[in-house]
Amino acid sequence: MGKICYIMGKSSSGKDTIYKRLKERMPQLKTITLYTTRPVRAGETDGVEYYFVDEERLAEMENRGCVIELRAYNTKCGVWKYFTADDGQIDLDRQDYLVIGTLQSYEAMCKYFGEEIMIPVYIEVEDGLRLYRALERERIQDAPKYAEMCRRFLADQDDFSEENLRKAGIKKRFINEDIEVCLSEIQEYLQEKMF
Ligand SMILES: Nc1ncnc2c1ncn2[C@@H]1O[C@H](COP(=O)(O)OP(=O)(O)OP(=O)(O)O)[C@@H](O)[C@H]1O
């Protein structure tokens, strides 16, 4: 039976960086394309970054029971939903997968597929350093959104509280101080868990 390696962590913990680097290091892990109801942006292609669908299509998929997990965000442009669907992309008889998500989506995946096939990879960075990296990343944007950066920093304190981590059964933590050390630790751990 295949496994789903699930990358999680607070904002600016380095999830995205680690996800991209792990994909290169472990090309045998397949990735999953999420769905979204947000409008397609310039340069994006349907089926590459996301599958872009409307509310009607989402409702139809929900009725068929193939929405595994869904997150809704109240943005300035309305409510945007992101979701994972059981649409044939995930074939655990043949493949292992690499997925990035939230603690809530991890729990929903555990419920849907069973905890035994999930391998949680929780990335941690000391708060001061994490905030510093968040600020550095924001400062080089064309239009830095510092308030949003702070909102996410604070929201993650609650979302990834020690109590929530305990409830989700997250025990192991990977410290992302030195990216190369962190990547090697994760790769070794995943190889051990998968084979
Ligand atoms: N080990 C590291 N050392 C130095 N900088 C790092 C390290 N890991 C990640 N970074 C940098 O920290 C910033 C945040 O990383 P990244 O965008 O991967 O985090 P994230 O967890 O995906 O954040 P978010 O959830 O907010 O999108 C980026 O600018 C990235 O280049």
Image: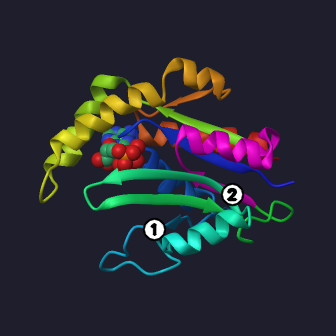
Q: Do tag 1 and tag 2 residues touch (Cβ < 8 Å)?
A: no
Q: Which residue is tagged 1?
A: 37
Query: Nearest the camera: 123 or 66?
Result: 66
Within 10 Å of disc 1 (Cα), the crowding (few <14, some 14-19, many 20+) is many
Classify mark 2: helix, strand or loop.
strand
Identify residue type, mark 2.
Answer: Tyr
Q: Which class describes the residues within 10 Å of circle 2: few (<14), some (14-19), or many (20+)?
A: many
- Name the spot of residue 193 as percent of width and height, x first: 77, 40
Taking the spot 48% from the left edge, 80% from the top edge, the residue there is: 46
Q: Which residues are magenta?
A: 96-118
Residue nearer the viewer, 178 or 97: 97
Q: Does the rendering let one see residue 28?
A: no
What is the magenta segment's predominant secondary structure? helix
Q: Is residue 115 visible?
A: yes
Any magenta on residue 115? yes
Answer above or below: position of 74 versus 152: below
* For residue 50, side relative to residue 98 (left or right): left
User: Which residue is tagged 2?
Assistant: 97
User: Where in the figure is residue 173, as x and y percent of width and height?
Assistant: 56, 28
Horizontal side of 65 relative to 44 (left or right) equals right
**Which label sits on residue 90?**
none
Which residue is pictured at 83% across the width and 65% down the height? Answer: 94
Kind of residue at badge 1:
Thr
Give ligand 1's quarter of the image. top left
Q: CA distance from mark 1 to mark 2?
A: 24 Å
